[in-house]
Image: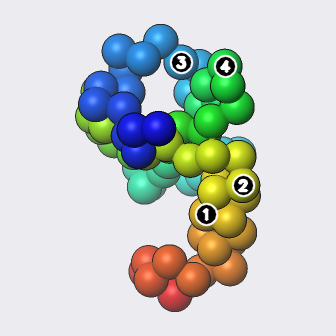
Amino acid sequence: MQPYIESASAAGLAWVKSSYSGNNGDCVEVATLPDGTRAVRDSKDPHGPALLFTQNGFDDFAAAATNSRLGGRNA
């Protein structure tokens, strides 16, 4: 599996922004591919690339983000 999609907007996916996202523009959007793979993109760059995760990989990513283990501003 290629680990990214070159142009997220060209992929024809239904993107969803978390209900926890505020209006500050620092959001990610998630889409589910037909095979269950999850795609994640930056909402500020909808035409840019998207990272791809297996279901288990996405669950791990989401858990790390929830627990602030990714080294972001809230870490």
Q: CA distance from mark 2 to mark 4?
A: 16 Å
Q: Which circle's residue, 1 or 2, is located before the other in the chain?
A: 2
Identity of the residue drawn at 63% across and 57% down: 57
Q: Is residue 57 above or below residue 69?
A: above
> Residue 17, labelled with which disc?
none
- Between residues 8 and 35, which one lies in front from this camera angle? 35
Left or right of 1 on screen, residue 58: right
Dot in front, 3 or 4? 4
What amino acid is found at the position of numbered circle 1 in the picture?
Phe
Q: Nearer the viewer, mark 1 or mark 2?
A: 2
**What residue is pinned by disc 4?**
34
Residue placed under numbered mark 1 in the picture: 61
Label drawn at residue 13? 3
Quick check: can you spot residue 55? yes
The residues bearing labels 4 and 1 have C-alpha atoms spaced at a distance of 20 Å
Viewer-proximal residue among 5 and 24: 5
Residue type, numbered disc 4? Pro
- Asked if one can make out residue 62 in the rendered structure from this viewpoint, the answer is no
Q: On the picture, is 2 further left or further right than 39?
A: left
| Pointer 1 or 3: first along the chain | 3
Q: Earlier in the sequence, mark 4 or mark 1?
A: 4
The label shown at residue 56 is 2
Q: Amino acid at mark 3?
A: Leu
Could you tell which of marks 3 and 4 lies nearer the N-terminus?
3
Residue sticking out furthest to the front: 1
**What is the secondary structure assignment of the residue under circle 1?**
helix
Q: CA distance from mark 3 to mark 4?
A: 10 Å
Q: Secondary structure at mark 3?
A: loop
Label 1: few (<14), some (14–19) or many (≥20) C-alpha neighbours in 10 Å: some
User: Where in the figure is residue 23, as x and y percent of width and height?
Assistant: 50, 49
Q: Nearer the viewer, residue 4 or 49?
A: 4
